[in-house]
Amino acid sequence: MPLLAFVINFSIPAKWNKVSGWASTIAILISCVLSVFVFAKVWNSNHIVHQQQLWFTIGNTKIYTGILLNNLSVLMLLLVSLIAMPVHIYSTAYMKGDENLSRYFAYLSFFCFSMLALVVVDNLILFYIFWELVGFSSYLLIGFWFTRDKAVQANKKAFIMNRIGDIGLLTAIIILFSQYHTFDITQLFADKGLIAQSVIKNGLWVAPLGSLPSIWQYIACGGIFLAVAAKSAQFPLHTWLPDAMEGPTSVSALIHAATMVAAGVFLLGRVYPLFNGLELTILAIIGCFTAFMAATIALTQNDLKRILAYSTISQLGFMIMAMGIGAYASSLFHLVTHAFFKCLLFLVAGIVIHQMAHIKDDNAMDIDPQNINNMGGLRKKLPFTFIATVIGGLALIGLPLTSGYLSKDSILIQSFEWSEGRNGVFKLIPIFALLTTWLTAFYVTRLIVKVFFGELRMLHGKPDIKLHIKDGGWQYKLPLVLLAIGCLFPLFSVNPLLYEQAWLFKGFAINGGLEREDVYHTLIPAGVNILSIIVIYVAYTIYVKRKTNIFPQEGFLYRLSFKEWYFDKIYNKVIVKPVLTLSTASFWFDREVIDGFISLLVKTGIILSKLSAWVDHHIIDGFLNLLVAIVEAISNFARKFQGGKVQYYLFSMLVIILALFILKIVF
């Protein structure tokens, strides 16, 4: 359906711009309804749908193509369409008046098509094709406003960094095919609740076709991690995601919730049995570091969308860490809950930025409408938006009665269980996960307080400012309501405190879930949430009551956070500048040496050709002309002997005889 909408939007004339939005919205609505139907038929029913047909043959190798619908597929199918639907409705209002509206919805529909196809294909070739199309679609959407230089730079950065990951994925696919001679996911992997019958060793699923040789195992898994790190913005390939905020906010909502960044976690879910214990531990370390690092950066950022972008990176780090510690079900659980509250927060950000832009235009002000330092007190003007923000923020923090509490609670508990019996280094992972949770509580509170509490800071010194702002119509409010419902616990569990009873968790957990057997199941949730509430109060005190400021905007730690750990600066110095220097040197070498040598050859050829022309004209042609002249002279001379005068003949004979006589006498 989104593919059909894509074709329609590129076919309709420009004057039918308004039709394009509803064409895409109706298409994704139908997809959503059909996804619900498919989900109801397949989820936990032991009825895995796997249809194939022969695609092509190379030698004796037959490549089949088809669809694979299992728990993971139908969950993602439903999630993508459920998140995309409110984004489409929101976009009909948010993008209203844009002269390229049909192009926007064409790109958006193609993006959804690519992601929906990605989650249902059954072989790695098609997976790679749609993996590339997801990246290409995001490139088009991030740079939608291509007249802005920042948007162009952002989509190029995203595209190039994702190509690095794509090289890794392609390498892994080639290795798997060379080892197992198949691209079929069902033949490559078997796992409980995902594809087929499980083979479990030490609590982990294993590939049924045998193990890869060690060197190829590490290269393949390294390639897959590169792909995951690029798509899901994990260290060290995370820096493209904050810059991707240059696209429309509705696009940011879709990219950060259930499409682009979710594709990396989905890939891990698809090939999870491939990873061994060491590789999973590396995943856990990198995921934990990414979560902590991104949370520290979000503390000091002032751009509203950039704070949410680093929040996304941090939450994705939680998901990757969960995969690494064996909390497979919890990782996917958090992927789903995160999609709802992060999409909600981005749509809210879009409304706030839109209204700030109205204030800026109405009063001819020179301000950044995305800078939270210019905001404040908006809860009085945007009450509906404020309530939605609070619901999304509480879910992001992970407080009780929210869906975020259930999924994050499960990850934190299992991280401590995983660290039991391991040495001190590995015990740092759950500790840093806890710190990340509290940092999240602080920067979310800071964001909400700075945007919605106090007084509108742009009013300072300008009492006559015009404030014609509001929450917006139903196209803004309905998506917020739908997403806010998904941020609350009843959608996932009847018990707001026990993640084991969540239907989504049970669908992926080994043996249906975990039993509460140790103190972690009580101590961790209580300790995390009590301290989170304290952190919220401290942040509120700092930014509303302004009684104290324990975080002065100076010093190394502040600069480290504000400058985003200097990653972009380091990459520019270590990678970008050397590459540019090399390219400049290569250009000089090509222009001066290669082109110079070619030019020398050309000049030499021209000189030789001129010399050849001179020789041909003056020597070759001159010699021939000389021969002609000699022959002509001889012939003219000989012709005189045949003049018809007898006395001339006698005279000639006498001369010849005399000459012969003289020659005889002399010689």
Image (tube, grey):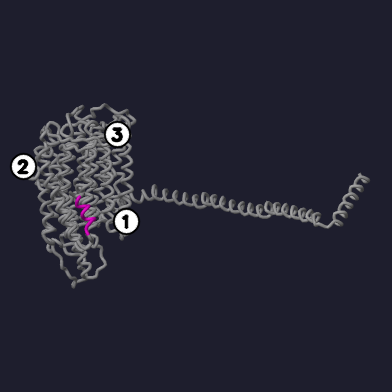
Above or below, 621 against 414 in this view is: below
Q: Which of marks 1 and 2 is nearer the N terminus?
A: 1
Local SS, label 2: loop
Taking 589 as reference, is 533 left or right?
left
Residue 443 visible at all:
no
Give how far across and how far down residue 28 sits, in percent: 16, 50
Label 3 and label 2: CA atoms lie apart by 51 Å
- Amino acid carrying label 3: it is Thr
Q: Given contact means CB atoms under 8 Å apart, are the residues at marks 3 and 1 in contact?
A: no
State the residue in front, 370 or 639: 639
Q: What stretch is highlighted in magenta?
A: 4-12
Q: Where is residue 73 in the image (x, y as percent from the top left)?
A: 17, 39
Q: Mark 1 points at which residue?
A: 152
The residue indicated by pointer 3 is: 57
Residue pointed to by mark 2: 494
Mark in front: 3 vs 1: 3
Q: Of residues 154 and 643, which is closer to you in this image?
A: 643
User: Image quadrant for the C terminus?
Assistant: top right
Magenta residues, dominant SS class: helix
Does 437 lie within the magenta span? no
